[in-house]
Image (cartoon, grey):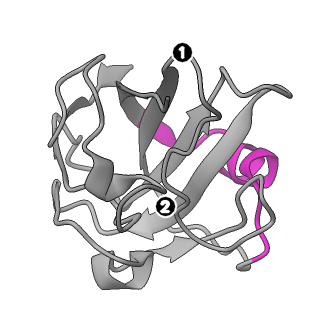
């Protein structure tokens, strides 16, 4: 399987700028993806925090992003041309990193190149998105950022 290369405003394993967290504007960070296979019809993304106090916390699920490879900073996924589902807080859309005080948490921004567009409703959660993607992933990649609060 091909690996997607992901770049953003933070380097791998570096601090995510405050602008993209609950302490800032909670904007969706800009991303650049290279290595998108020619047969790609859409991009899906899942953002997760495995260090959350009560287990994996999903911050964002989005799909049907156009496979352009360039995604500017945005306040909502519709500005990027995609659709989004429900995060672990039960809210629609992107929820910026917001760990409790203490050590920094890791945030995995996982991207998937798909050979199809997905017909999912806005109530979609991480598990439903993963199930819908089965058999359609042409390539995947991730970038991990960190964010901590004192």
Where's residue 4, x and y in %? 26, 30
**Residue 91 appears in which quarter of the rendering?**
bottom right
The reply to whether the magenta stretch includes residue 88 is: no
- Callout 2: few (<14), some (14-19), or many (20+) C-alpha neighbours within 10 Å? some
- 126 and 55: which is toward the camera: 55
The circle on residue 10 is none
Q: Look at 35% across and 68% down and name the residue there.
A: 25
- Callout 1: few (<14), some (14-19), or many (20+) C-alpha neighbours within 10 Å? few
**Residue 33 appears in which quarter of the rendering?**
top left
Q: Secondary structure at mark 2?
A: loop
Q: Secondary structure at mark 1?
A: loop
Is residue 40 visible in the rendered image? The answer is no
Q: Look at 44% across and 42% down and name the residue there.
A: 112
For residue 53, side relative to residue 99 (left or right):
right
**Residue 37 appears in which quarter of the rendering?**
top left
Where's residue 14, x and y in %? 25, 21
Q: Look at 57% across and 55% down and name the residue there.
A: 60
- 131 and 146: which is toward the camera: 146
List the single residue furthest toward the front. 150
For residue 11, side relative to residue 75 (left or right):
left
Which of labels 2 and 1 is toward the front?
1
Is residue 14 visible in the rendered image? The answer is yes
Magenta segment = 123-138
For residue 102, side relative to residue 85 (left or right):
left
- What distance separates the C-alpha of mark 2 from that of mark 1? 39 Å
- 37 and 15: which is toward the camera: 15
* Residue at image mark 2: 116
Q: Look at 30% across and 16% down and name the residue there.
A: 13
The circle on residue 103 is 1
- 135 and 14: which is toward the camera: 14
Where's residue 38, x and y in %? 20, 48
């Amino acid at each position: 399987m091909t690996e997607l290369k992901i770049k953003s405003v933070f380097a791998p394993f570096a601090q995510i700028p405050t602008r993209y967290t609950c302490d800032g504007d909670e904007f969706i960070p800009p991303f650049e993806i290279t290595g998108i296979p020619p047969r790609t019809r859409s991009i899906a993304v899942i953002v997760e925090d495995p260090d959350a106090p009560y287990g994996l916390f999903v911050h964002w699920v989005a799909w049907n992003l156009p496979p352009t490879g360039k995604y500017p900073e945005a306040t909502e996924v519709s500005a990027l041309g995609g659709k989004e589902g429900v995060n672990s807080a039960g809210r629609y859309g992107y929820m910026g990193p917001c760990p409790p005080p203490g050590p920094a948490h890791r945030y995995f921004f996982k991207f998937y190149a798909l050979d199809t567009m997905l017909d999912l409703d806005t109530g979609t959660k991480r598990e439903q998105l993963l199930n819908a993607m089965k058999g359609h992933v042409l390539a995947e990649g991730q970038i991990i950022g960190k964010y901590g609060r004192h």
